[in-house]
Amino acid sequence: MTSAPSHAVMTAAVEAYVSAFDAGDAAAAAALYAPGAVIEDPVGSPVVTGEGVLALYANAMTRGLKLELTGPIRTAGDSAAFPFRIHYPPTAERRCIDVIDTFRFDAQGRVIEMRAFWGPDNIQFSRENQTHA
Amino acid sequence: MTSAPSHAVMTAAVEAYVSAFDAGDAAAAAALYAPGAVIEDPVGSPVVTGEGVLALYANAMTRGLKLELTGPIRTAGDSAAFPFRIHYPPTAERRCIDVIDTFRFDAQGRVIEMRAFWGPDNIQFSRENQTHA
């Protein structure tokens, strides 16, 4: 087993990830990744890598997405897992999505693999909200 | 991509998993797994498989562990991820652990891979509790 970063290092990376969304800063989110890192979002879809990483976050920031952690960050070995809710702008049809991400880190504390667990049943739509209002 | 079980099937398996702990039923927990399934608990430790699966749950049930889901079950492709808290009996030194598990399923809805994300920083001890009391 290669040396893994500490809980503090992995937790700081997750918090920097949330902050990048707060600031709408795609480059800050992409900078958490090592070269050659792969993103599978959602799990089961084709992986994104290389220049696709920054493009993915540029798209998310343009759409005004914000992340809210909804529980403690778990760390194990070279990995972290964290539950959060994605909030959309009030004008969007999607209201929020409940997601769990896993980050796998290299020894330098850079993310080498991200996997996002969420599906259609984890999305709440504004329409549903209106129906229940 | 092989056919994945539905959100309902994967969610039911997670709920059955929690119920198995409620009932202290190790066989019920182990029965959710396909033959040859692998458990990595925590992530980064040697995998458990075969007869080790039932032994793992027999040990957990003997210790009186209970699971409480602490957020929605996420499903994506052939996988589920869920946040929960493990509660220990009042007599135990460990009070609780915050964990995220991921389950990967085969087409029949049986778990073929479980990975548990938790580490020392996710454990709360009774001693700490007393210190703060």
Image (cartoon, coloured by chain):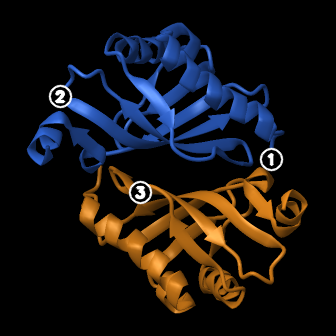
Chain colours: A orange, B blue
Label 2: state its secondary structure.
loop
Callout 1, which amino acid? Answer: Met
Residue located at (82% from left, 63% from top): A129
Residue wearing tag 1: B1
Query: If you read the primary sequence from the N terminus, does the residue marked by circle 2 or circle 1 appear first?
Result: 1
Q: CA distance from mark 3 to mark 2?
A: 25 Å
State the SS at label 3.
strand
Is there any visible trace of residue B5 in the rendered image? no
- Asked whether A124 or B103 is in front, the reply is A124
Q: As displayed, is residue B80 above or below residue B112?
A: below
For mark 3, what is the residue? A80
Is residue A46 at all visible to an observer of this figure?
A: yes
Q: Which residue corresponds to the image point at 37% horizontal and 22% vertical from the top-left?
A: B65
Residue at x 77% of width, y 60% of height: A124
Residue A57 coordinates in the image, percent (x, y): 62, 83
Q: Are marks 1 and 3 on the same chain?
A: no
Q: Height in image: A117 above or below B94?
A: below
The alpha-carbon separation of the residues under discs 1 and 3 comes to 26 Å
Number of the front mark, 2 or 1: 2
Vertical order, A54 against B34 (above or below): below
Residue B93 numbered mark, or none: 2
Q: Say if mark 1 contacts mark 3, CB within 8 Å.
A: no
| Secondary element at tag 1 | loop
- Dot 2 falls on which chain? B
Dot 3, crowdedness within 10 Å: few (<14), some or many (≥20)? many
